[in-house]
Structures are given as C-alpha cells and as structure tokens.
Image: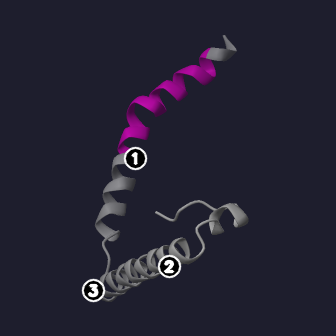
C-alpha cells in the first residue's frame, strides 16, 4: 500500500510534468544558445589558429622525420594527426 503513495505521484510526474518541463527547458536553451557576432568571430579566429598550428606541427614533424628518422622511438611518441 505504501508503494502506491509513491508510485502514483511518480507516474503522474513522469507522464505529465516531466515531458513539459524538458520541452520548455530545451526550447529555452536552444533559443538562448546562439552565439553572438563577437563570439562567432572569435570562434572562427580560434579555428584558423588551430589549423595553422596543426600545419606547423606537421611541418616540424616532417623535418624531424627527414633529419632524425627514429626520433619518435626515442621519445615514445606517435605521429600527430
């Protein structure tokens, strides 16, 4: 009998309140979740910086591969990709 006191309100909550609550939460979150113009520019700048850094690291690894073929074995590192 005591489980009914918990099961009935919990069932009502899960069936009626929780879906509405989740819908309102994520609907509001997606509306306010867009980036401002400043944030979009900063994100693009950081993406470009990351691409340039990746190219530099790749170039440095290529140079090291050409001059010291076993440098990865000495340092226990794998190829950056």
Q: Nearer the viewer, mark 3 or mark 1?
A: 3
Spatial CA distance of label 2 from label 1 is: 53 Å
Please name the residue that numbered disc 2 is placed on.
63
The answer to which of marks 3 and 1 sits earlier in the sequence is: 1
Spatial CA distance of label 3 from label 1 is: 28 Å
Please name the residue that numbered disc 1 is placed on.
22
Q: Nearer the viewer, mark 3 or mark 2?
A: 2
Check contact, mark 3 vs mark 1: CB within 8 A. no
Q: Secondary structure at mark 2?
A: helix
Residue at x 32% of width, y 77% of height? 35
Check contact, mark 2 vs mark 1: CB within 8 A. no
Q: Secondary structure at mark 1?
A: helix
Residue at x 47% of width, y 74% of height? 62
Is 7 or 41 nearer to us in this picture? 41
Spot occupied by residue 53 in the image (x, y as percentages of width and height) = 45, 81
Within 10 angstroms of label 3, few (less than 14), some, or many (20 or more) residues? Answer: few
Spot occupied by residue 29 in the image (x, y as percentages of width and height) = 37, 62
Q: Nearer the viewer, mark 2 or mark 1?
A: 2
Magenta range = 4-20
5 in the magenta segment: yes
Is 19 or 1 nearer to us in this picture? 19
Is 17 or 66 nearer to us in this picture? 66
Please name the residue that numbered disc 3 is placed on.
37
Colour basis: one colour
The answer to which of marks 2 and 1 sits earlier in the sequence is: 1
58 in the magenta segment: no
Spatial CA distance of label 3 from label 2 is: 39 Å
Mark carried by residue 41: none
């Amino acid at each position: 009998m005591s489980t009914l006191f918990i099961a009935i309100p919990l069932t009502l909550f899960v069936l009626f309140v929780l879906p509405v609550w989740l819908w309102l939460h994520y609907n509001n979150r997606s509306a306010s979740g867009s980036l401002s113009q400043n944030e979009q520019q900063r994100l693009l700048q950081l993406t470009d910086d990351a691409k340039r850094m990746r190219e530099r690291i790749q170039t440095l690894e290529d140079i090291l591969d050409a001059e010291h073929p076993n440098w990865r074995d000495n340092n226990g590192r794998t190829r950056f990709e």
